[in-house]
């Protein structure tokens, strides 16, 4: 299991290729039958307004602790083989990935459910806050998430 | 006793600072910490609380040396 | 939208990196906020027996037609921005990816639901059949899928 | 009329061939095609049917030149 909170750009597919190579070298090949992945990216539009940038604030220390706790709980609940979670902080531009959640399990039911549950828990519990820079020059804090279910 | 207060995001802007060390009497709750740190301002609706980096609530007791954080609803992911 | 039925090995993360680069160059950056991906891989164990290989038979012509139809229906239903589906046929070894489903949408709810719905439809409708080679030398047709919900 | 029959997977092994062109009278259904192609063998439970590469059922009418496929439950993905 790996949790990353990073200010550098996030490359989901490269990260997954590297992480899975490690996973296979430690667990062996053929141990998982399913992986489910979610990538959340920054859109250039939010609540009808054009957005040119975003600042992602977090609570250093607590953020990592909360992510670690939820990843462990979800791994146990769905009996996952492995889990990878990466989240950006700092300044972002439209199109850039914000979050990557990947899980590996024996069968697909657990993979789909664990991946989605982890994202919903992250969105309601993990201390991150988005401030948007609109193209008209104004700034605003994002105040609520879109519905997950 | 001393507790360490932190504010995040819009609350940091509202309070004009990202935190402070606050002196407060024994037997205090998170609400007491808020009142001491904010100079008696009412707490905005929807404020979330963490004590020592664990989600908590305003009725919880605080202890000397605790880190008490106040922040708006989270919007990551 | 792209559908591939291929006998060559499938590299999900490389395929996704390439496909998403194309997607961005045609749609522009910042148009989608969510992507959900599922990869099904061959396990070295099925129904309690050690498996050393698998042959994936399909119905050339119908397989592609069924996959195309379900991809179009699901894209419409969840208003997807794009979709990529790749499925192996022929001889496989444990650890090799069998299927990749990836969807891109504005928000996460549609991405999670469409990805899972596409996999369930594929597993119940698309004409593929698995024959397993067990390590004891015997062969058998897989007769049913594990539960998806 | 002539219809083109195909068998897949375990059904191909059971029938000993992957298909055939079958001569059958007009007004035939998929069941009639099965009986002609299999030499009167009963159809195993759970057999699925496709007509011209679309999922169908045993009661459907077939037409000259149709491709009629029989196969077990699918197990891809």
Image (spheres, coloured by chain):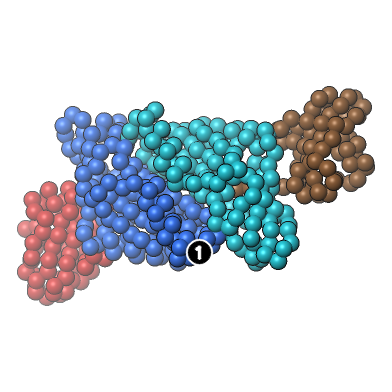
Chain colours: A cyan, B brown, C blue, D red
B28 relative to D51 in the view: left or right = right
Residue A120, x across and y down, in percent: 59, 46
Rendered position, A15 above or below A149: above
C62 relative to A47 in the view: left or right = left
D23 relative to C26 in the view: left or right = left
The chain that hosts pointer 1 is C
Look at the image and tell me whether residue C59 can be seen: yes
C11 relative to B76 in the view: left or right = left
Report the residue at 51% width, 43% height from top.
Answer: A101
Q: Name which quarter of the figure residue D17 lies in.
A: bottom left
Rendered position, C106 above or below B9: below
Look at the image and tell me whether residue C120 can be seen: no
Residue C44, x across and y down, in percent: 29, 33
Q: Name which quarter of the figure residue C121 lies in.
A: bottom left
Residue A135, x across and y down, in percent: 67, 64
Report the residue at 25% width, 38% height from top.
Answer: C93
Element type at mark 1: loop
């Amino acid at each position: 299991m790996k949790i990353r909170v990073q200010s550098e750009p996030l490359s989901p597919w490269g990260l997954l290729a590297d992480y899975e190579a490690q996973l296979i070298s430690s667990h062996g090949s053929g141990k998982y039958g399913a992986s489910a992945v979610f990538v959340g990216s920054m859109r250039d539009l939010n609540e009808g307004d054009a957005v040119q940038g975003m600042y992602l604030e977090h609570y250093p220390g607590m953020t990592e602790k909360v992510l670690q706790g939820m990843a462990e709980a979800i791994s146990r609940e769905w009996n996952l083989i492995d889990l990878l979670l990466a989240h950006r902080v700092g300044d972002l531009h439209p199109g850039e990935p914000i979050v990557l959640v990947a899980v590996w399990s024996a069968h697909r039911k657990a993979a789909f459910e664990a991946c989605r549950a982890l994202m919903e828990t992250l969105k309601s519990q993990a201390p991150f806050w988005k401030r948007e820079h609109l193209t008209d020059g104004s700034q605003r804090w994002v105040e609520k998430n879109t519905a997950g279910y | 006793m001393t507790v360490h207060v932190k504010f995040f995001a819009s609350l940091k802007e509202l309070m004009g600072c990202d935190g402070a060390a606050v002196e407060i009497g024994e037997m205090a709750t998170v609400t007491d910490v808020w009142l001491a740190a904010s100079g008696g301002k009412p707490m905005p609706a929807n404020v979330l609380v963490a004590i020592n980096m664990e989600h908590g609530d305003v009725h919880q007791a605080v202890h000397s040396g605790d880190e008490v954080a106040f922040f708006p609803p989270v919007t990551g992911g």
